[in-house]
Amino acid sequence: MAASCARDWADGLPADVLLAIFHRLDHIDILMVADRVCHTWCAAARDEPSLWRRITMRGDEGIARRINRCGMACEAVRRSAGQCEAFCGESPCLRSLRLISCSGVTDEGFIEVVKALPLIDELELSLCDNVGADGV
């Protein structure tokens, strides 16, 4: 019996349609699965920064225990190629946070975030014009 060639499941599917599908998925699912489906899915998941502009990493609780969320978060931000505008996910164990040129962050928002992250021991806040002495 001859070995069959791997099928490209997105063959003929326009890139904008594939990206529209990916935009409906949690980014953990994209990181864990898209690379393994076919070449087209892998390329779309890796090479399209707009897909990573707003990153949401919730994931299933069962999966969350078995994965390296920190490594996945770093990979997701890397794939954004500097275009990441928002990162959403529960991070009570976060120890390091860097906010650079975040003009949308205010004193009130910054205080709320820091209260939700009790383990922060390293914080960089640079060029965030709307965070003043009250926020810090």
Image: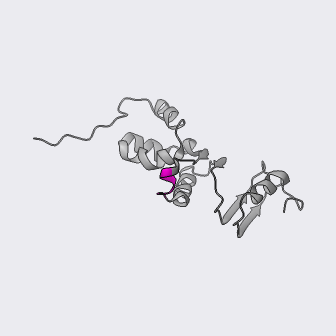
Residue 64 place in picture, x, y as percent: 51, 53
How is the rendered protein coloured? Answer: one colour
Give the left or right position of residue 64, taking residue 119 as reference. Answer: left
Residue found 57% across the figure and 51% down from its top: 81
What number of labels is visible? 0
Whether residue 68 is visible = yes
Which picture quadrant has residue 118? bottom right
In magenta segment, residue 66: yes
- Residue at x 52%, y 56% (from the top left corner): 72
Report the side of 8 relative to 105 (left or right). left
Q: Quadrant of the N terminus?
A: top left
Q: In the image as oriented, which residue stretches furthest toward the left?
A: 1
Asked if the stretch drawn in magenta spans residue 28, the answer is no
> What segment carries the magenta color?
62-67
Q: Which residue: 51% across, 48% down? A: 28
Where residue 123 sits, quadrant-wise, is: bottom right
In the image, residue 74 lies at what x, y percent?
A: 56, 58
In the depicted structure, whether residue 27 falls above or below residue 111: above
Relative image position of residue 111 (x, y in whole percent): 81, 57
Query: Where residue 59 sits: x, y (%)?
Result: 53, 47
Direction right: furthest residue: 134
